[in-house]
Image: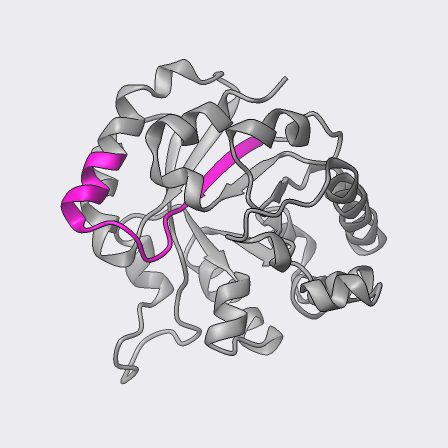
């Protein structure tokens, strides 16, 4: 049985007091979600330590960072290393988000370095993949996604691959209010699992694959009912505790 996961990516939102309050609002109502659903919250860097302290006694909420440096340490002003994140402590790191690829020109080569840093420091990567609207309209979506998987995850040995969570985020559905249809999402998730199985065999059957394109309380139940969708990487809806928890309660 694959793990059911709902991860909240807060992106560059909330002041520190607002972020602490959001974490408290999630914590106080976390008993309302099924015991087999694992929550992950990914606040901005400035919030990680105080949120980690709030979550220290929680058994089903983990902490993620939204990114990390590809270097181990040194003269890289403004960067945050995987070792720093592990010391917070974070348990997960989001890598390869489309906004990082688009605005900060992250390449597959950089992501290979980052994923190794995260794994070497005892954390688990949430590795994001997905196609743009133009690529979807040109019927290149399977080609794009398979390339992203091949260039990064296929550089891992099987033992490290088992620690990875994959998040499929159709770029055209992020923050736009558009959502891939349930059929489109399931089709891509099934393709991803089959493609991974070609290299990692039966391990791919246990890999959680999250959907990350404008998932919200109104569509989460239909998405999560699909056989290859194991949860969501939630953006805007994770900034409201009620919406985030409603999504987590959407598993059939």
Residue 30: horizontal and vertical position, in percent? Answer: 35, 21
Can residue 125 be seen here? The reply is yes
Residue 70 in the image: above or below residue 181: below
In the picture, the quarter occupied by the N terminus is top right
Question: At x 48% / y 17%, what residue is drawn?
Answer: 35
In the rendered view of the protein, which quadrant contains the C terminus?
top right
Q: Is residue 51 magenta?
A: no
In this picture the colour scheme is one colour
Residue 149: quadrant of the picture = bottom right
The image position of residue 158, as x and y in percent, is 69, 53
Question: Does residue 147 appear in this view?
Answer: no
- Residue at point 62% right, 24% down? 221
Please indicate whether residue 233 sits to the left or right of residue 137 in the image.
Answer: left
Q: Which residues are magenta?
A: 4-22
User: Given the current orientation, which residue lies at the most extreme front position?
Assistant: 177
The question of residue 13 being in magenta is answered with yes
Disc tally is 0
Q: Nearer the viewer, residue 233 or 53?
A: 233
Lateral position of residue 63 relative to residue 48, left or right: right
Q: Nearer the viewer, residue 217 or 146?
A: 217
Question: Residue 24: x, y in percent?
Answer: 23, 30
Going 49% across and 26% down the picture, which residue do you hit?
A: 248
Indicate the position of residue 236 as horizontal and vertical percent values. Answer: 42, 45
């Amino acid at each position: 049985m694959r793990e059911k996961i709902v991860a909240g990516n807060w992106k560059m939102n909330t002041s520190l007091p607002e972020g602490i309050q959001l974490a408290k609002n999630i914590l106080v109502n976390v008993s309302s979600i099924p015991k087999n659903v694992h929550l992950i919250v990914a606040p901005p860097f400035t919030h990680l330590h105080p949120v980690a302290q709030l979550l220290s006694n929680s058994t089903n909420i983990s902490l993620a960072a939204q990114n990390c440096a590809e270097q181990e340490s040194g003269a890289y002003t403004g960067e945050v290393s995987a070792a720093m994140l592990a010391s917070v402590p974070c348990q997960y790191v989001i890598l390869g988000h489309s906004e990082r690829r688009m605005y900060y020109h992250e390449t597959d080569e950089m992501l290979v370095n980052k994923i190794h840093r995260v794994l070497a420091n005892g954390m688990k990567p949430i590795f994001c993949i997905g196609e743009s609207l133009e690529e979807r309209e040109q019927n290149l979506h399977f080609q794009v996604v398979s390339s992203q998987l091949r260039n990064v995850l296929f550089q891992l040995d099987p033992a490290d691959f088992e620690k990875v969570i994959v998040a499929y985020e159709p770029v055209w559905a992020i923050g736009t209010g558009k959502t891939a249809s349930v059929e489109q999402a399931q089709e891509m998730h099934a393709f991803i699992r089959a493609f991974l199985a070609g290299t990692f065999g039966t391990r791919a059957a246990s890999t959680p694959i999250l959907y990350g394109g404008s998932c919200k309380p109104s569509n989460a139940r239909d998405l999560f009912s699909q056989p290859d969708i194991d949860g969501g990487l939630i953006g805007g809806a994770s900034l409201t505790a009620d919406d985030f928890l409603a999504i987590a309660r959407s598993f059939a």
